[in-house]
Image (cartoon, coloured by chain):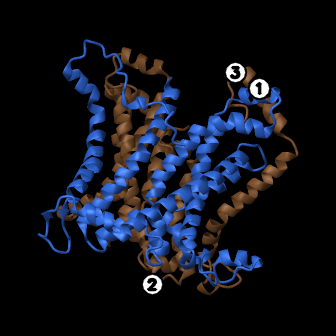
């Protein structure tokens, strides 16, 4: 990775010199500082993970219990308390909304970056501005609308809301991937008389497939973690995993081990997805503005 | 930071790509067709609800009393502005957002500078550092509320006990710092990632040149790196502010806006007005005010993105 970033030989030489120069004892200090910070930031997550494998009596002790025999009791008891439907709802909402998002955003990003329809900049920035609109501004109409058409506590409704939430991120991310395609390939395809559909299917989609996968992963992360819409628009049938966790703030707030096991299961899919998608995370978080 | 010296948003004044004259209206629509589904969808689910919010904000309506709807003009806004609780929520939102953004940005810059250097296990460190941002915010909030902040068994007190801290109930005695602490923990990785991307986009030649000119590490950072980072820092601060203003999960889970109203921010206030008091009019008016406030930040954010965007496509 260190040598691949630079392209021109001169540039590469400069980079090597710079990196070579950096290998000084001072970097041991940097390494130690970075490791201490990383462990401090990661510690609460680790603690949550560990507590989930404890018995309740070991979960809240003074001083904290560090050594213990792991048990799956808490995970079992959560599934015994009907955790599965919440998990399925979360999965449905994340996957469904992500499919919608990719289906809507890919053609739009194409129109805005490859075909460059009139006022494409305006359209791009319009999408971006919808992401900056606070959720509290639209929750009431969505709630009232959902009530009136009988779609309150409905997983499709929630998925549609998540689609709207993630659409700008997807349009901007996919646009940034399309912008990296070599122009000649697209032009060659068009001169060969490929129709738009063929051009899309045969040439563009295969080339941006990794980018689409990254976009999908980022969208799923946001949908899976979303709380405000979930807690406002669902109650029993369509409730997602974060809504399940709400149960722990009152009646079950004393069951730390069980609560940690539930939190671990809620958080783990996204932690793993995020680790995998690390390379793309910053592009997603900055809505495609930073690579 | 929001200096007026920023160039005008060129993005909103697009230069039209020279369309070949042979295009008929029909062909133009055919070109535009792939864009339309997404555009219509975005308008339907974001702009229409906002227009409805505007409409609700001039009606008096309570969901508990169907048929109670009537036009009241700006009365809801008057009610909101004179509402002690609303002003308290505005104050809390500003405190919460500003402290979180500033603290997480400072930490983020520090960590990004460390991560920009080469050391053993750098990619593992990076992976561990981004994890707080990935943890489902509702789960993170639960974790902090219990295992971390608990007065008797919480780890925060346990770790601070050598310093004479004993049985502090963080969430109720210092509710705002507690929430800010959780949010800083969550948002530092976000700031760090964007600043790190900025650091890594620096050209090695410029740094080399600075060294050749005899600049020391601090001078290089201050005079070369920081100006280069400026737009990345701005972007991170603006995007961070837009998201942190909307903080809801942590407050809902940890303090429920309390004790009293100590941590009620605007989203939580509106949530309570809408879903606890079912006062649609007042909640909508508060929602509109939040949007207007956010637009101000969003405009600047869009301008920064537009600058980055112009540079990239230039």
- Asked whether the residues under marks 2 and 1 belong to the same chain, the reply is no
Mark 2 or mark 1, which is nearer to you? 1
| Category of crowding for the residue at label 3, using alpha-carbon neighbours closer than 10 angstroms: few (below 14), some (14–19), many (at least 20) | few
Instruction: Characterize the local packing of mark 2: few (<14), some (14-19) or many (20 or more) Cα atoms within 10 angstroms.
Output: few
Mark 1 sits on what residue? B209
Q: Which mark is residue A251?
A: 2
Write the residue at 31% across / 74% down. Answer: B276
**Along the viewing direction, whichever of B260 and A224 lies nearer the viewer:** B260
The label on residue B60 is none
Q: x, y percentage for residue A20?
A: 83, 34
- Give the chain letter for blue: B
Looking at the image, the residue that sits furthest to the top is B21
State which chain disc 3 sits on. Answer: A
> What is the CA distance from the residue labelled 2 to the residue labelled 1?
63 Å
Identify the subunit bearing mark 1. B
The residue singled out by tag 3 in the image is A8
Task: Say above or below: A112 vs A191.
Answer: below
Chain identifier, brown in the render: A
- Residue at the spot 55% in from the left edge and 76% down from the top edge: B171
Q: Is residue A232 above or below residue A56?
A: above
The image position of residue B32, as x and y in percent, is 28, 29
- Chain ID of residue with mark 2: A
Q: How many marks?
A: 3
The structure residue drawn at horizontal position 43% and vertical position 69%, both measured from the top left corner, is: B264
The kind of secondary structure element at disc 1 is helix
**Can I make out residue A239 in this image?**
no
Q: Are marks 2 and 3 on the same chain?
A: yes
Q: Position of residue A242 (x, y in %)?
A: 44, 67
């Amino acid at each position: 990775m260190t040598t691949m970033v630079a392209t021109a030989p001169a540039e590469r030489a400069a980079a090597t010199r710079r990196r070579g120069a950096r290998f000084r004892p001072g970097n041991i200090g940097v390494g130690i500082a970075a490791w201490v910070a990383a462990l401090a930031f990661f510690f609460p997550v680790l603690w949550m993970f560990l507590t989930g494998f404890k018995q309740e009596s070991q979960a809240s002790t003074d001083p904290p219990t560090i050594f213990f025999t792991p048990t799956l009791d808490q995970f079992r008891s959560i599934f015994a308390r009907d955790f599965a439907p919440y998990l399925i709802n979360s999965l449905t909402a994340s996957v469904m909304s992500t499919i919608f998002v990719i289906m809507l955003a890919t053609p739009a990003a194409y129109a805005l970056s490859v075909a460059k329809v009139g006022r494409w900049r305006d359209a791009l920035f319009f999408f971006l501005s919808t992401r900056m609109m606070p959720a509290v501004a639209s929750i009431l109409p969505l709630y009232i609308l959902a009530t009136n058409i009988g779609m309150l506590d409905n997983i499709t409704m929630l998925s549609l809301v998540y689609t709207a939430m993630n659409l700008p991120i997807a349009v901007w991310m996919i646009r940034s991937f399309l912008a990296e395609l070599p122009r000649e390939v697209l032009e060659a395809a068009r001169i060969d008389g490929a129709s738009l559909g063929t051009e899309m299917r045969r040439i563009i989609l295969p080339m941006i497939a990794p980018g689409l996968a990254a976009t999908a992963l980022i969208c799923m992360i946001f949908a899976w973690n979303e709380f405000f819409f979930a807690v406002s628009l669902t109650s029993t049938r369509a409730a997602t995993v974060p809504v399940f966790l709400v149960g722990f703030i009152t009646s079950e707030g004393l069951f730390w081990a069980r609560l940690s096991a539930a939190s671990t299961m809620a958080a783990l899919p996204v932690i793993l997805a995020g680790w995998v998608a690390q390379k793309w995370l910053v592009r997603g978080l900055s809505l495609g503005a930073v690579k | 930071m929001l200096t007026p010296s920023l160039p005008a948003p060129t993005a909103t004044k697009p230069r039209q790509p020279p369309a070949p004259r042979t295009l008929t209206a029909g062909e133009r629509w055919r070109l535009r067709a792939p864009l339309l589904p997404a555009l219509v969808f975005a308008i339907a689910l974001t702009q229409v609800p906002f227009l409805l919010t505007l409409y609700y904000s001039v009606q008096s309506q309570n969901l508990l009393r169907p048929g109670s709807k009537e036009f009241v003009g700006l009365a809801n806004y008057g009610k909101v502005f004179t509402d002690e609780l609303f002003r308290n929520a505005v104050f809390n939102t500003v405190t919460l957002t500003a402290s979180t953004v500033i603290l997480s940005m400072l930490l983020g810059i520090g960590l990004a500078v460390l991560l920009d250097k080469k050391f053993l296990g750098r990619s593992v460190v990076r992976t561990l550092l981004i994890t707080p941002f990935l943890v489902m915010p509702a789960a993170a909030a639960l974790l902090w509320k219990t295992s971390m902040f608990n007065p008797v068994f919480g780890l925060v007190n346990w770790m601070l006990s050598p310093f004479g801290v004993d049985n502090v109930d963080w969430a109720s005695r210092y509710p705002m710092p507690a929430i800010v602490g959780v949010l800083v923990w969550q948002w530092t990785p976000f700031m760090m990632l964007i600043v790190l991307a900025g650091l890594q986009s620096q050209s090695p030649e410029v740094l080399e040149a600075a060294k050749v000119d005899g600049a020391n590490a601090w001078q290089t950072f201050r005079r070369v790196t920081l100006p280069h980072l400026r737009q990345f820092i701005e972007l991170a601060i603006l995007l961070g502010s837009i998201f942190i203003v909307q903080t809801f999960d942590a407050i809902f889970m940890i303090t429920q806006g309390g004790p009293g109203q100590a941590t009620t921010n605007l989203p939580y206030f509106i949530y309570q007005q809408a879903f606890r008091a079912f006062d649609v009019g007042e909640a909508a008016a508060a929602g509109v005010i939040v949007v207007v406030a956010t637009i101000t930040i969003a405009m600047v954010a869009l301008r920064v993105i537009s600058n980055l965007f112009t540079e990239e496509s230039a």
